[in-house]
Image: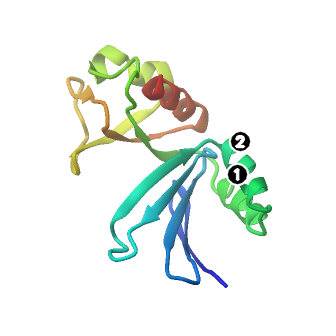
């Protein structure tokens, strides 16, 4: 039987790590916004991620049904709604994003979404408290704080 461990990620949601009977490891980060990130770890180096899949809430439900439902579904829903108010999220600037190559100032991210950008991570290097002239670059990870609806708008802007 596989083993599951859980870690709370304050302001983000929860992380669930799963180890199969034959030693394969994967993890799921359940964001308070409903999004799920599924990580597949290298068997020889459990700190190295081989692949990452981002799922919206409805996609995660569909996949769970394909896998036979879940005894964890109620617990995940409880964690998602545990803390009202401010939410933290990590979002990737996707190819084709309307904001790719645009500065924070030009995007008017704060006035359009109500979200604050806490850091931008490029090639593994974090740029905390980015200024108005910092760019949204394809492939960068944006660490943002705001209300779930504002983070949803930001997610849409960074993905299309």
Query: For mark 1, does the 10 Å Cα neighbourhood hold few (<14), some (14 to 19), or many (20 or more) residues?
Result: few
Q: CA distance from mark 1 to mark 2?
A: 9 Å
* Residue 47 falls in image quadrant: bottom left
- Check contact, mark 1 vs mark 2: CB within 8 A: no
89 and 95: which is toward the camera = 95
Query: Quadrant location of the N terminus?
Result: bottom right
51 and 134: which is toward the camera = 51
Residue 58, which numbered label?
2
Specify the farthest residue to the front: 22
20 and 126: which is toward the camera = 20
Which of marks 2 and 1 precedes in the sequence? 2
Specify the farthest residue to the top: 106
At mark 1, the secondary structure is helix
Q: Which residue is mark 1?
A: 63
Residue 152, which numbered label?
none
At mark 2, the secondary structure is helix
* Residue 43 falls in image quadrant: bottom left
Compared to 29, does 86 lie above or below? above
Compared to 150, does 108 lie above or below? above
Residue at image position (73%, 49%) is: 61
Residue 67 relative to residue 134: left or right: right
- The location of residue 24, given as percent across then percent down, is 50, 75
- The location of residue 56, given as percent across then percent down, is 62, 41
Q: How many dots with numbers?
A: 2
Residue depth check, mark 1 versus mark 2: number of the one nearer the observer: 1
Compared to 126, does 16 lie above or below? below
Query: For mark 2, does the 10 Å Cα neighbourhood hold few (<14), some (14 to 19), or many (20 or more) residues?
Result: few
Residue at image position (38%, 17%) is: 108
93 and 49: which is toward the camera = 49
Residue 122 relative to residue 77: left or right: left
């Amino acid at each position: 039987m596989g083993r599951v461990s859980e870690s709370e990620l304050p302001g983000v949601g929860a992380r669930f790590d799963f180890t199969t009977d034959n030693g394969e490891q994967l993890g799921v980060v359940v964001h308070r916004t409903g999004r799920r990130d599924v990580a597949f770890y290298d068997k020889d180096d459990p700190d190295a991620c081989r692949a990452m899949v981002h799922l919206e809430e409805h996609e995660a439900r569909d996949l769970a049904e394909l896998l036979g439902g879940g005894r964890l579904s109620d617990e995940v829903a409880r964690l998602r709604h545990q803390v009202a108010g401010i939410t933290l999220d990590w979002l990737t600037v996707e190819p084709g994003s309307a904001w790719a190559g645009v500065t924070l100032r030009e995007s008017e991210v704060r006035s359009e979404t109500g979200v604050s950008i806490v850091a931008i991570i490029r090639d593994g290097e974090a740029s905390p408290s980015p200024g108005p002239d910092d760019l949204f670059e394809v492939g960068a990870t944006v660490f943002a704080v705001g209300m779930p609806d504002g983070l949803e708008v930001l997610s849409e802007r960074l993905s299309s």
